[in-house]
Amino acid sequence: MKSSSIVILDNGASTIKAGLLGVHDDQPLIIPNAVVRSKGDNATYIGHELAKCRDYTSIRYRLPFEKGFLVDWDAQKAVWDGIFSSDVLGVNTSEASLLITEPYFNLPNVQDVYDQFVFEEYEFQSYCRIDVGGKLMTNHLKEIISFRQWNLMEETHIVNEVKEACCFVSDDFTRDLEACRVQPTRNAIVQEYIFPDYSANRPGRIRRAGETLDDSRQTLVMNNERFTVPEILARAGWDKCNGGGEHISPPGGSAGHVLGQHRPDRWQHRLTGLSPATSELRSLAPIKCDVVVFSSEHPILEAYYSAVAFAARPEFAQCVVTKEEYQESGSNACRRKFRDWKPVEKEATRSREQGKGKGIESQMDVEGDDIPPPTKKTMRGRGRGRGAARRQV
């Protein structure tokens, strides 16, 4: 398998980090995972085309992901079509292999559609689907801000900039929350974010201490919102990050490699992105073991870098499902090979025990329970999804 024929997609809810192994190892392409309608430009931009937008006033995002799950496959296919096209990666999918990420605790029926798109729509030779932690934190922040201050439910672009500029993971959540409660307006955490003025070409930014503003500038006060929203994702991610060995198992949002073995003589993790504080890790580790937390220069790229390292290893070829395997067994081939959060082995053991002592027909019925009902095959052709996305915006 040639390195140039392996496509890597860190398929995030906000952005997709994409590249070809051996070509984009150090610097992947970062592409918005959205179909965007700009009223100012009176145009629709799909994925990588958003860079052409010149007026970000009143833009509407159509996101393939909602609350951590891929729900809009027409929009997602339109973005993927652009990525695979000659304008971006320029890859012939029928001659390539794919390594793609999916969220933790992904639903089985959603995973089945992943399989269908990879093999039936794009006809990849083989692919591997791996889970990484990630949810759309911007949505949670939009809801909180819209309830407390400004109605920004339709301003995904602005809220995402606020999140990037203001949010952080607290070292001591209880302490910071109490500080915000005792002094809601005067504490070390509170910040004012100045909204952008796109008509005057003035981007949004954090207000400097003592800075005076004219009446035309509008601001957003960020208090405990700065750390309460990331805390939910960081804690949820850490609960899932409990495996050993070297694999992609990131906590929180965009994170990366977990290195280490759960052994008494060595307990070290490299955690990036929305990672738990050192004090929280210290309470989980054996008392004689060192716990070291390394920050990342580019947290959103860590999952992609981990995928590159995984795809470059010789054993990657043993971890993929080939087109021939899928044609023979369908999504069952993917369920057998891709590690998942569901206790598949226990269910399989229970089914075998139920089949003991029964006739051949009964045993065949039990073994056939894993076979999903036939699903309606999606439309072929890469132009279909793109057109559908344009029609529904």
Image: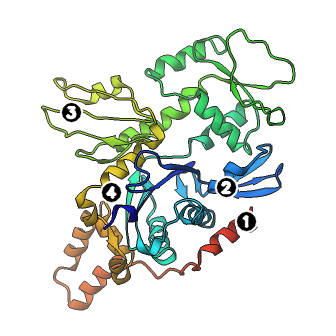
Disc 3 or 4, which lies upstream in sequence? 3
Q: Please tell me whether mark 4 or mark 1 is closer to you in this view.
A: 4
Q: CA distance from mark 3 to mark 1?
A: 50 Å
- Amino acid identity at mark 3: Trp
Disc 2: which residue: 49
Disc 4: which residue: 311
Q: CA distance from mark 2 to mark 1?
A: 13 Å
Q: Quadrant of the N terminus?
A: bottom left
Given residues 17 and 246, the one toward you in this image is 17
Q: Point out residue 361 in the picture as x, y percentages from the top left corner.
A: 26, 91
Disc 3: which residue: 267
Disc 2 or 1, which lies upstream in sequence? 2
Disc 1: which residue: 390
- Amino acid identity at mark 1: Arg
Q: Is residue 12 above or below residue 82?
A: above
Q: Point out residue 160 in the picture as x, y percentages from the top left corner.
A: 63, 39
Q: Please tell me whether mark 2 or mark 3 is closer to you in this view.
A: 2
Say what secondary structure mark 2 lies in.
helix
Q: CA distance from mark 4 to mark 1?
A: 34 Å
In the rendered picture of this protein, how many numbered marks are placed on residues? 4
- Among all residues in the image, which is located at the extreme left? 265
Q: Please tell me whether mark 3 or mark 4 is closer to you in this view.
A: 4
Say what secondary structure mark 4 lies in.
helix
Q: Residues within 10 Å of mark 1 (few under 14, many from 20)?
A: some
